[in-house]
Image (cartoon, coloured by chain):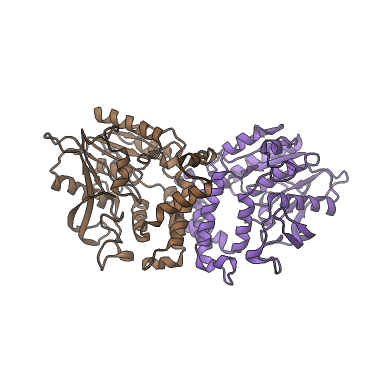
Chain colours: A purple, B brown
Amino acid sequence: MTGYEIFDLGNLWLQSGATLRGAKLAYKTYGSLNRAGNNAIVFPTFFGGQHYQNEAVIGPDHALDPGRYFIIVPNMMGNGLSSSPSNTPMPYDRARFPHVSLYDNVASQRRLVTEMFGIERIALVVGWSMGAQQAFQWGSLYPGMVERIAPICGSARTSRHNFVFLEGVKAALTADDAWDNGWYEKPPYKGLRAMGRVYAGWAVSQAFYRGEVYLGLGYSSLEDYLVAFWEGRRLGADANDLLAMIWTWQHADISANEESNGDLPRALGAITSRAIVMPGRTDLYFPPEDNEAEVGMMPNAELRPIESIWGHLAGGPGYNPADTAFVDAALRELLES
Amino acid sequence: MTGYEIFDLGNLWLQSGATLRGAKLAYKTYGSLNRAGNNAIVFPTFFGGQHYQNEAVIGPDHALDPGRYFIIVPNMMGNGLSSSPSNTPMPYDRARFPHVSLYDNVASQRRLVTEMFGIERIALVVGWSMGAQQAFQWGSLYPGMVERIAPICGSARTSRHNFVFLEGVKAALTADDAWDNGWYEKPPYKGLRAMGRVYAGWAVSQAFYRGEVYLGLGYSSLEDYLVAFWEGRRLGADANDLLAMIWTWQHADISANEESNGDLPRALGAITSRAIVMPGRTDLYFPPEDNEAEVGMMPNAELRPIESIWGHLAGGPGYNPADTAFVDAALRELLES
């Protein structure tokens, strides 16, 4: 990963009631803010991702072109760069790290955007997966500030089925005695590997495996794909960090705040910015049906499914060139509207 | 569970090369064989199931009516009643229990049917999930003997995606140190619970959770459903037994035998009996697409999806009354043809 900046949030009061003292928001920017101050794009990270993993779709060949836009990538809390169980000092470290909500993340990001950069209007908030959930939350909380949103493979509220999928992921990770209720000194590698293996069936589709797509991606067999991609993907992460982000994901609900008071239709109705919502057609845990219902409650939104067998990964930054091109085209259209 | 019988298979040579000495096939029968000897139905068990769990759809109100048919329910190897890791004496006990294939199961069941009962023709082989796989295998191996088959929510060959789903299930179960590579003295309860939780997202559909169907089934909350149904479902089972059946499932392929020599189209083409193949429309690991391809290679088969939000459980014996009625109607039509 390349360099990044830290925005000091000070004493951050969380929805859960805890105060995260000296809270940090790690971020990186690409391009420059123009004089009119109207070319800013916010592009939050996804579950387990860090800012540099968004870079695959930032560049002159993409809609997110730093030659035209000032792109801010804020790292989600729990991702190991922003405040996380793995980098927070005692007493809120490790297993004692407090619950951080979707709202907490987005409210903190707004402080970065306004206090650090003095930005009053944002041209676009775009994100994949949990990044999409942050885009929905931005649009709902700050409709006067956000001109456009593009949530990709994510929902405004985590569905019950998605919650249950994550229960399985958690159960696999925490079945490892080495996890020790979060007080491990050595990483619970067996649990991290198990989590990767559970994830493998969920994140891409039945058709992806039917077509042995992984053989074209540099993996020599199905088992090689499971070990090198899915287990490998988690082994470098901190277990408590992953669990912190899973909590945020499981409880993600753009209406869970004072503004909307748990009223999801009201929270969705507040998203007046133009939106193109892009679920993956074969996504197993953020299925298009959930977005379809949400788009129906948004005043200025279009549902545009990514017709792909890549499941949830269809929207992953740079994962599949055809899907990336589809998303880029939608973002260009949105930005030019 | 009620009483059952044991058929002694003697020294069973398995495809894996091992000999299971004193192998046992546990079974139960319902009704009587008629004089013509043409009213026999074979109804194998599913993953983790035992014969009594098939009884929910055996009765005068069902297609499988013991007043008309002689119904034989053979227990699958590994299910704790037929030869299994948990009941096999040393030296092939526990973690050393040999791999038992789909073919081994069905060839053993054929011996029961012919040697014990002298049956030459079978009116129907029907089964759910791994029971469906056994029905496909019966039809392919013994087309002159089997008049009809009805595979419900199962495929003739386990797909790669289904294999990967099971890798996640295995990983969760075996992440528990208490599993001890199969040499546990006390059950690895944490792993069994984790397995149950992983399973919960897979076995029913997104729409099932969206509609909170479990609240109508005697569960007081989502968490109650996860604990009481999904964890509870596995806690009474033996971990090695579950892993033995998972091996059978992961490697299930009706062409993996000398008759078909790995040629799946040939194995499917050999199923000349009339077949109604019933996938669940929302089944996540035995999706309708897999059956659709298989039915296209079967000379006398019809694809008839169960239009249900119950996912894989749509075909479970007696699980959902509407789906049970759908299956019963198909079985009646098939039996009367």
In this view, the residue farthest toward the left is B35
Q: How many marks?
A: 0
**The residue positioned farthest toward the bottom in the image shown:** A185
- The residue under the point 25% across, 43% down is B138
Q: Position of residue A162 (x, y in %)?
A: 56, 46
Residue B42 sits in quarter: top left
Q: Is residue B37 left or right of residue B234?
A: left
Q: In the picture shown, does residue B284 fall above or below A47?
A: above
Q: Which residue corresponds to the image point at 53% horizontal and 53% vertical from the top-left?
A: A167
Answer yes or no: is residue B241 visible: yes
Q: Return the x and y of residue A150 as percentages of the image width and height.
A: 69, 41
Q: Identify the image quadrant of residue B321.
A: top left
Horizontal relation, residue A41 to residue B219: left or right:
right
Q: Position of residue A49 (x, y in %)?
A: 64, 55
At a point 51% along the width and 45% down the height, the residue shown is B220
Q: Is residue A150 above or below residue A180?
A: above
Q: Quadrant of the C terminus of chain B?
A: top left
**In terms of image quadrants, where is residue A120?**
top right
Instruction: Say if residue B263 shows up in the picture.
Output: no
Where's residue B254, x and y in %? 30, 46
Farthest residue to the right: give it: A35
Q: Is residue B256 left or right of residue A239?
A: left
Q: Nearer the viewer, residue B140 or A274?
A: A274
Of the pair B38 and B135, the residue shown nearer to us: B38
